[in-house]
Image (tube, rainbow, N blue to C red):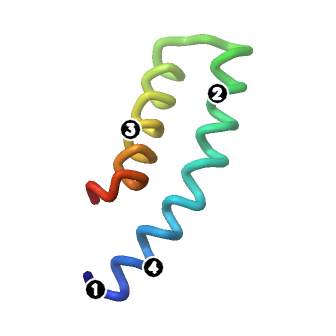
Amino acid sequence: MHQWWLKIRLSLRAVIFPLICIQFFRTLLFPTPFDVFILFVLFLAYLGFLLQVY
């Protein structure tokens, strides 16, 4: 794997988890379909990084 892709992947993984936490609490307070969709997309992206799909 290229070194630059590994750095980007690790950086994105570190950034996505706090965004998921913030979006989760926002969805709990103001549940709209758009917020749920964003939370779902962030969760799938984080899961993809954890399982090394990307």
Q: Which residue is mark 3?
A: 44
Q: Amino acid at mark 4?
A: Lys
Q: Amino acid at mark 3?
A: Leu
Q: Dots 2 and 3: beta carbons under 8 Å?
A: no
Q: Earlier in the sequence, mark 1 or mark 2?
A: 1
User: Which of the 4 quarters of the picture holds residue 32?
Assistant: top right
**In the image, residue 40 above or below residue 32:** below
What residue sits 62% from the left and 44% below the top? 19
Sort mark 2 into few (<14), some (14-19) or many (20+) by Cα contacts within 10 Å: some
Q: CA distance from mark 3 to mark 1?
A: 23 Å
Task: Give the secondary structure at mark 4.
Answer: helix
* Residue 16 place in picture, x, y as percent: 55, 51
Q: Dots 3 and 4: beta carbons under 8 Å?
A: no
* Residue 48 place in picture, x, y as percent: 35, 48
Sort mark 3 into few (<14), some (14-19) or many (20+) by Cα contacts within 10 Å: few
Seen in the image, is 27 located left or right of residue 11?
Answer: right
* Residue 31 place in picture, x, y as percent: 61, 11
- Quadrant containing the N terminus in the rendered view: bottom left
Q: Which residue is mark 2?
A: 24
Mark carried by residue 31: none
Seen in the image, is 47 located left or right of residue 22?
Answer: left
Q: Amino acid at mark 2?
A: Phe
Q: Earlier in the sequence, mark 4 or mark 2?
A: 4
Seen in the image, is 28 located left or right of residue 10?
Answer: right
Extreme residue toward the front, this view: 51
Q: Earlier in the sequence, mark 2 or mark 3?
A: 2
What residue sits 43% from the left and 73% below the top? 8
Q: Which residue is mark 4?
A: 7
Q: Which residue is mark 1?
A: 2
Task: Give the secondary structure at mark 3.
Answer: helix
- Quadrant containing the C terminus in the rendered view: bottom left
Sort mark 1 into few (<14), some (14-19) or many (20+) by Cα contacts within 10 Å: few
